[in-house]
Amino acid sequence: MPLIAEFQFTREIEDRLLAPIEISWLAIEKVCFGTMQALVAGLAVIPFAWLLLRPGVELNLHSPLRFACVTLLVALFSACGGLALGCSVDQAHIGLMFSMVLTPMIFFGCTYYPWSALAHFPILQKIVLVNPLVYASEGLRGTLVPQFPHLPMLAVLLGLAAFDVLFLAIGLRKFRGKAVS
């Protein structure tokens, strides 16, 4: 949202675009800052979610390194996806973005149910794998509550890394295009 606003009417981003560095580095700085924001927000939500879901859900952090890796990849996905979406959507179409992109992404992203719950709908179970939020949800589920069914961790890590690279590449290309215009 802030990125969309910076490119709109006031063109707040222009002073930073005049810096004597490659334009892509400004986008990478935005991704780094977005990643840090996502990490802080995500780590702040976990204790509250645990308090809310506590009857029947026990957090079980067997592998802190795996948790850190998944959390970092999810935060990076959030930042890279934000860069790609923020540079692709005009301010007038923000509502459309929420209704046409983010809402279906959340609903079909296995945030409310494990991926294995779709076993009775095998076609849908395969189709939702193109949604990067599936890997984020399943990865966090697998590291925080491994007693619940989840995707294999290798699939999660590979999926998150692939989507991070894809969204970063799209975001950098879109950012350059918006910055130059």
Image (cartoon, helix red, strand yellow):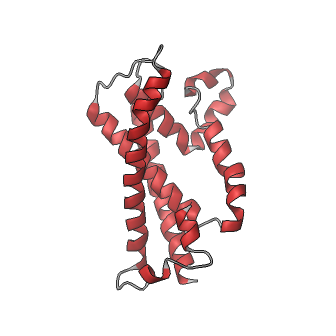
Q: Quick check: 147 above or below 109? A: above
Left or right of 74, for residue 117: right
Is residue 94 visible in this depiction of the protein?
yes
The residue nearer to you, when weighing 33 against 169, is 33
Tell me which corner region of the image, top left, top right, bottom left or bottom right, holds residue 105: top right
Q: Is residue 149 left or right of residue 100?
A: left
46 or 174: which is nearer to us? 46
Q: Residue at x 28, y 29 (%)?
A: 63
Q: Please give the count of numbered marks on the rendered protein.
A: 0
Q: Position of residue 72 (x, y in %)?
A: 36, 46
* Residue 93 image-quadrant placement: bottom right
17 and 25: which is toward the camera: 17
Residue 24 vertical position relative to residue 107 in the rendered view, above or below: below
Residue 152 visible in rendering: no
Q: Residue furthest top?
A: 56
Quadrant of the rendered image containing residue 133: top right
- Residue drawn at 71 percent across, 51 percent down: 100
Question: The N terminus is located in which quarter?
Answer: bottom right
Quarter placement of the C terminus: bottom right
